[in-house]
Amino acid sequence: MSTKDMVSMADRVVLVTGAGQNVGRQIAIHMAEHGAAGVVVNDYFLERAQTVADEINAAGGNAIALQADVSSHDSVKAMFAKAIEKYGRVDALINNAGNAGATPNPEARKPFYETGPDVWRTWTGVNLDGVINCTAAALPGMIERKTGKVVTIISDAGRWGDAGMEIYAAAKAGAAGFMRSVARGMGRHNINANCVVIGAMGTPMIEQRMAADPERAKRILEKYIIRRLGKPTDVANMVVFLTSSASDYVTGQVYPVNGGFTFAL
């Protein structure tokens, strides 16, 4: 196998959650650009997923859009059944869906000690339960084939802490611990499980906020060794590596793609 072929996705079917916009969208597009045999574009909103799938197909790729609420075990099982019906398998899972989910509780930004479990599930439902649900659906087929890749996108909040985001941070830290445990349990089946940590991303909403408050933008960027916001392509590049043959001997790891905001020790 040539070095170029090591990052090819030509023989792999990839499912990306939360792929209707921003980082997830770019991951899905990157997979197609690297020759994925099939890309399953998931989003809570089908129209967003369909737009990305159409973009991939128009460029010569092979993608389908599937709606699912990753916080629902039944919804995830139904999504995987449709993906397998279409492509026969799922070789790589990218747990990207995150933040407050598609339908956040209006009280989610209140101090957690002023709310309760129904509000906390805004954060834990997608960032922890969603990761567990999707990984549980992906693993049986991977175990049967004795190969597979699982990558979960987490946040520096789960490693560094973030005042006011305690439940979100707990969910992301939990997802990282879950992935390390999956790596330990699944290594004998030749299944790799890793995390990618992201910091502040240059999404349209964030860029708009920073443009409106240059002083706040300066304070934020001073915390980053590379003084710019992250780009979706920065994350997608790492995810392609972690789902390709180039990373076959890499598992249980957490890779910061965050401009040096925090370091991996």
Image: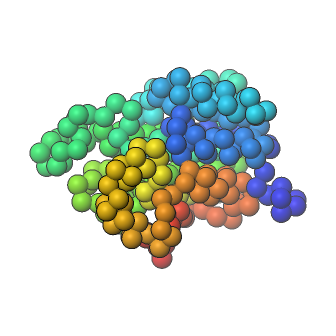
Count of marks, rendered view? 0
Taking the view exactly as shown, the residue that stands out farthest to the right is 1
> Percent x, y for residue 63?
69, 30
Q: In the rendered image, which quarter is residue 161 located in?
A: bottom left
Taking the image as drawn, is residue 252 in sight? Answer: yes
Residue that appears at 60% across and 62% down:
251
Can you say whether 31 is above or below 64 in the image?
Answer: below
Taking the image as drawn, is residue 254 in sight? Answer: no
Image quadrant where one finds the N terminus = bottom right
Residue that appears at 62% across and 58% down:
238
Taking the view exactly as shown, the residue that stands out farthest to the left is 114
Q: In the rendered image, which quarter is residue 106 located in?
A: top left
Can you say whether 139 is above or below 76 in the image?
Answer: below
Residue that appears at 23% across and 55% down:
164
Give the left or right position of residue 49, taking residue 85 as reference.
left
Q: Nearer the viewer, residue 178 or 220?
A: 220
> Percent x, y for residue 120?
25, 42
Taking the view exactly as shown, the residue that stands out farthest to the bottom is 265
> Percent x, y for residue 193?
57, 55
Residue that appears at 47% across and 73% down:
225
Scheme of colours in the image: rainbow
> Percent x, y for residue 265?
48, 76
Q: Nearer the viewer, residue 15 or 104?
A: 104
